[in-house]
Image: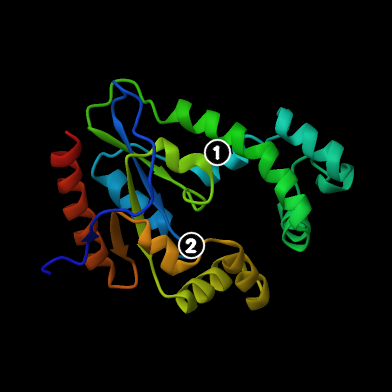
Amino acid sequence: MASNVNTGSAEQVRQAPVVGQTPAIVGLTGGIGSGKSTVARMFGKLGVHWVDADDVAREVVEPGTPGLVQIAEHFGKDILTAEGTLDRAQLRQIVFASPEERTWLEDLLHPMIREELIRQLKPEGYAMPYVLLVSPLLLETDQHQLVSKVVVVDVPVETQVERTMARDANERDQVERIIAAQMPREKRLEKADAVIDNGRPLDDVERQVRELHEKFLVDLG
C-alpha cells in the first residue's frame, strides 16, 4: 500500500447515525499513551471540529456539578482537595483497586459524559461534513453508537507504557494496570475502519491524517 493509513471494514456492528444528522461523527480512539490528542490536533489544523471525551469527563465533575456532589457523597469528603476539586489521583487509585467502585463510577458518569458530548458535537455554522469524537473508551462504552466510523491511533504497547510514564510520572505497574483495564490492542484494531500508525515520524503521521481527512471529505460529504 502507498499509504500507512489502514482502512477497511469494521467488524463491530454500530448503530447508524440518526437520520438527518449532520455532520457525521467520526470516532478517534486508542490506548493510553497512543497519542490521540496529538492526532486530533492535526485534524483540527485541517479545520475539523473535535471534542475530547477526557475534557468532557473533567467538565462533568467540576465544582458545583451534580457529578461531583454524588462522588463526594459516595466516597466521602476526603475525595476532594482543599480547594473543593476532585482529587483525581486518589480516585484513580480507588477505582483501579476495586472493580465494584469502578463500575459505580462508570454508571454515574458515562450517561453525563454522553449527553454533554452530543451537545458539543453539534457546532453552529460548521461547514465540514464530519466532526471528531476523541475518546479512549469509545469502544468500551456506548459512545461507539454515536459514530459512523472508527479511527484507531495505534502504537506498540511498550510505547504506550514509556510515553505514559514520561507524561504522567506514573510507575510502570500502574500504567500497565491501566492498559490491562482497557480493550486489548488487537481487539481494538479489529474494530477499526481506519488505523493511524503513530509510531512513525511526525511528518508521516501528518501525511496519514491528511489522506484520511481527504477520504472522509469524499465519503461523508
Q: Tell me the kind of residue under disc 2.
A: Gly
Residue 154 horizontal side relative to residue 213, left or right: right
Up the image or down, 91 lies above or below 5; here it is: above
Coloration mode: rainbow
Residue 29 horizontal side relative to residue 172, left or right: left
Up the image or down, 48 lies above or below 135; here it is: above
Residue 14 image position (x, y, % from top left) = 38, 42
Instruction: Give the position of the N terminus as an image quadrant.
Output: bottom left
Residue 25 image position (x, y, % from top left) = 34, 36
Question: Which residue does the image show at 21% across and 47% down from the upper left?
Answer: 213
Which of the 4 image quarters holds residue 56? top right
Q: Are marks 1 and 2 in contact (CB under 8 Å)?
A: no
Which of discs 1 and 2 lies nearer the camera? The answer is 2
Residue 196 image position (x, y, % from top left) = 30, 62
Q: Tell me the kind of residue under disc 1.
A: Val
* Residue closest to the eye, 15 or 49: 15
According to the picture, the residue beneath numbered tag 2 turns out to be: 31
**Mark 1 / mark 2, whichever is N-terminal:** 2
Question: Which residue does the image show at 50% across and 53% down from the upper left?
Answer: 136
Question: Which residue does the image show at 45% across and 76% down from the upper left?
Answer: 159
According to the picture, the residue beneath numbered tag 1 turns out to be: 56
Instruction: Give the position of the C terminus as an image quadrant.
Output: top left
Residue lying at the far left in this picture: please name it.
Answer: 2
Q: What kind of element bears circle 1? A: helix
Residue 151 horizontal side relative to residue 3, left or right: right
